Image (spheres, helix red, strand yellow):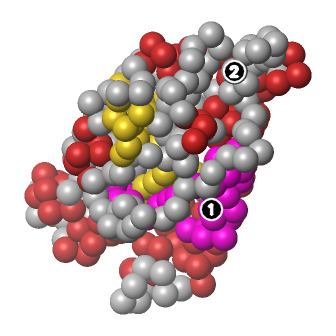
Amino acid sequence: MKISELAHQADATTKAVRYYESLGLITPERLANGYRNYTEDDVRLVREIRALHQLGLPVERTRPFLECLSAGSPHADDCPASLAGYRQAIDELTDRIEALAARRATLIANLDAAARRGSRVVPPDQAEAGGEDHLSLPRDLRAPTDDGAADHLPGTSMPRLALPSTAGKAVGLDALGPRRTVIYVYPLTGRPGTDLPEGWNSIPGARGCTPETCGFRDHFQDLLEAGAGRVYGLSSQDTDYQNEVVERLGLPFGMLSDPALDLARAIGLPTFEAGGNRLFKRLTLVVRDSVIEHVFYPIFPPDQHGRQVLTWLRDNPL
């Protein structure tokens, strides 16, 4: 067959076939007129080269596999030299993974340090007298009870819904990727100079959004190292309000804004009413491949919840 026919059958380009031939990986026979004549064996060799190259083996190092086929073996990796080629490729890939992991850890540490360095959080003991302390919890805070409002969520697919984030772009909840994404959903965060809804402390599960957020901030690097691909906070507050929280608390992750509670309607998240507004009840979703893998609900105490999620990730590795 002609080189164009070989390239078509092997799903390659004629340029690639010529390159393989220049390396001596394939040796077509010559016809009397001087033209090259490729065979089905050549098609098989080219396919093998391409398959191995897609796994990361340099083209030049596919030779032992091709020689194994040419020797009559039914599979290209039936020979000891082929197995040695696998081992070499695995060792090199392992070294690359370790190097990338080290670079990722350094970037996470730099991000965490930079976020903390820019934080303008006021410690509780320095808060203005008479001001609302959003960083600590009342000792008599009432714990929420499990009303079963989240029992249906595990196994639910995330909806085709894009929410604005404090990073300046919309995040598609149905396209979060194969790695685990932690989304902690909360009612609202208070901030200095802003009153909380009347009776806020007496509503079980309402108080504690700022301490919860600080917990996720403090455990952010640990969460990533435990397998979380991304972390988001999500509330019904608008993005401008959330941006102030991100800057004031020095958060290394973004917040998602859902003022219309579209996510609550789409998958049935529990809500409650306070101060004339409908708000999300506090819960956390662990999403993988666009499906809710695990739900934390109810959550108490909120200031310890970041560690609770970290413990679950460590106890349930992928």
The CA span between labels 1 and 2 is 34 Å
Compared to residue 54, the image places residue 138 above or below, namely above
Marked residue nearer the N-terminal end (1 or 2): 2
Q: Amino acid at mark 2?
A: Glu
Q: Residue at x 49, y 51 (%)?
A: 283
Q: Amino acid at mark 1?
A: Leu
The magenta segment: 289-318
Mark 2 highlights which residue?
Answer: 132
Name the quarter where the N terminus is drawn.
Answer: bottom left
Q: Residue furthest right?
A: 125
Q: Position of residue 315 (x, y in %)?
A: 66, 70
Indicate the quadrant where residue 119 lies. top right
Compared to residue 245, the image places residue 89 above or below, namely below
In the picture, measured across the screen, residue 314 lies left or right of residue 255, that is right
Q: Position of residue 256 (x, y in %)?
A: 42, 31
* Circle 1 Cα neighbour tier, 10 Å, few/some/many (<14 / 14–19 / ≥20): many
Q: Are marks 1 and 2 in contact (CB under 8 Å)?
A: no
Q: Along the line of sight, which residue is nearer the eye, 178 or 249?
A: 249
Q: Residue at x 37, y 38 (%)?
A: 273
Instruction: Determine if residue 250 is in view.
Output: no
Q: Residue at x 19, y 74 (%)?
A: 40
In the picture, measured across the screen, residue 242 lies left or right of residue 88, that is left
Instruction: Determine if residue 80 is in view.
Output: yes
Q: Secondary structure at mark 1?
A: helix
Q: Along the line of sight, which residue is nearer the eye, 85 or 3?
A: 85
Mark 1 highlights which residue?
Answer: 313
Q: Position of residue 171 (x, y in %)?
A: 36, 33
